Amino acid sequence: MSTVIIEPVGFRMLPALNELNRAFWTGGANGQLLIQRCAACRRWVHPPTSACPTCEGPVRPEPVSGRGSVYTFTVNAHQFHPEVDPPNLIAIVQLDEQDDLRIMTNIVGCDPGAVRCGLPVQVLFERHDEVFYPLFAPDGGEA
């Protein structure tokens, strides 16, 4: 699998990087979606936190496959920010590694009407200096 890194096509609100979230937001520089994983119980943990919420074990970022499926989504047809043109496809993607491992993101590279719950998707990254914003596109041209 070859990870796609794209240049920004418009405005995006970027995160403030800190010790807990830095790996998640910068892993795309190496083509990796990095999600924290507990060293003790091996559960994946997202959003980033200082300890495993299940067993309180230590967590560290590890790469995931970047594959998943659309768990739920909405098409935002209203302009919520002056620099962001609608429509925006906002989704929660369930990653393949764990049934309850989900991240909020945007779906790109397809018509909003083609998105459905269960749609297989693959990560790609939008580069903003040191932040590599994870986005998802249909996997295998299904949309």
Image: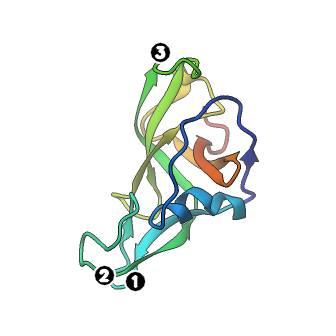
Give left or right: position of 105 versus 50.
Answer: right
Residue 57, disc: 2
Q: CA distance from mark 2 to mark 1?
A: 7 Å
Residue at the spot 46% in from the left edge and 23% down from the top edge: 75
Q: Give the structural element (helix, strand or loop) at label 3.
A: loop
Per the image, label 1 sits on a secondary structure element best described as loop
State the separation of the CA atoms marked 1 and 3: 42 Å
Q: Is residue 68 left or right of residue 73?
A: right
Q: Residue furthest top?
A: 78
16 relative to 61, above or below: above
User: Dot 1: few (<14), some (14–19), or many (≥20) neighbours within 10 Å?
Assistant: some
The image quadrant where one finds the C terminus is top right
- First in sequence, mark 2 or 1: give its number: 1
Image quarter where the N terminus lies is bottom right
**Measured from the top left, where is residue 141 in percent x and y?**
67, 38
Instruction: Give whichever of 10, 121 is nearer the camera.
Output: 10
Depicted 111 relative to depicted 55: above or below: above
Residue appearing at x 36%, y 65% in the figure: 49
Residue at horizontal 46 percent and vertical 64 percent from the top: 97
Q: Secondary structure at mark 2?
A: loop
Mark 2 or mark 3, which has the lower sequence index? 2
Asked whether the residues under the numbered discs 1 and 3 touch, taking CB atoms below 8 Å apart as contact, a structural biologist would say no
Q: Which residue is mark 1?
A: 39
Determine which residue is flagged by label 3. 77
Q: Could you tell whether 68 is left or right of 7 in the image?
A: left
